[in-house]
Image: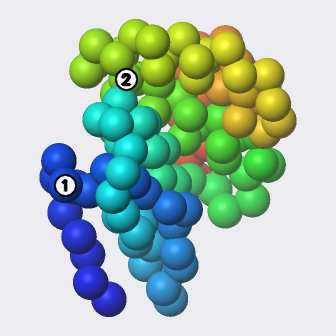
Amino acid sequence: MLAVPLTSANRHITPMHAVGVEFAPTLLFGLPPELTYEAAAHEYAHAWAAENCRPDLPPDLREGFAQWVAADVLRSKGFLGALEKLEARTDSPYGTGYRRLRSMQRARLWAAIRKEE
């Protein structure tokens, strides 16, 4: 498996592909920087969750968490227009899941998604 580092030349990310127990996003070309950051954060959040979260999360928590991470990256990079679009989504599980996670307190969020220690 070839892992392609995220650079300015890699401007598109497709969904994660499972390879055994490893996850690797496929990086392609063509998206503007704000969408590249959003997609990369979303997909890498799934990779992190696969190793650190309960495997039985419902779709709204799984996608909501990935959207929550993407929103934080957009905010930190100053891509406020893309952040507004992400926050305006109402579709399930992405928009509804994001709203659910955003409304949870940080401690409650981690308790809801983390594996039992």
Spatial CA span between label 1 and label 2: 19 Å
- Whether residue 51 is visible, yes or no, is no
Would you place residue 10 above or below residue 68 in this image?
Answer: below
**Left or right, residue 47 beside residue 59:** left
Question: Residue 33 placed where, x, y %?
Answer: 29, 35
Residue furthest to the front = 30
Q: Residue at x 67, y 62 (%)?
A: 55
Question: Residue 43 placed where, x, y %?
Answer: 47, 53
Instruction: Report the amino acid beneath label 1.
Output: Ala
Question: Residue 76 placed where, x, y %?
Answer: 28, 18
**Left or right, residue 50 beside residue 38:** right
Q: Could you tell me if the residues under marks 1 and 2 are in contact, i.e. CB atoms within 8 Å?
A: no
Instruction: Report the amino acid beneath label 2.
Output: Leu
Would you place residue 6 above or below residue 90 in this image?
Answer: below
- Whether residue 60 is visible, yes or no, is yes
Q: Which residue is mark 2?
A: 74
Q: Which residue is mark 1?
A: 9
Q: Secondary structure at mark 1?
A: loop
Question: Residue 74 placed where, x, y %?
Answer: 37, 23
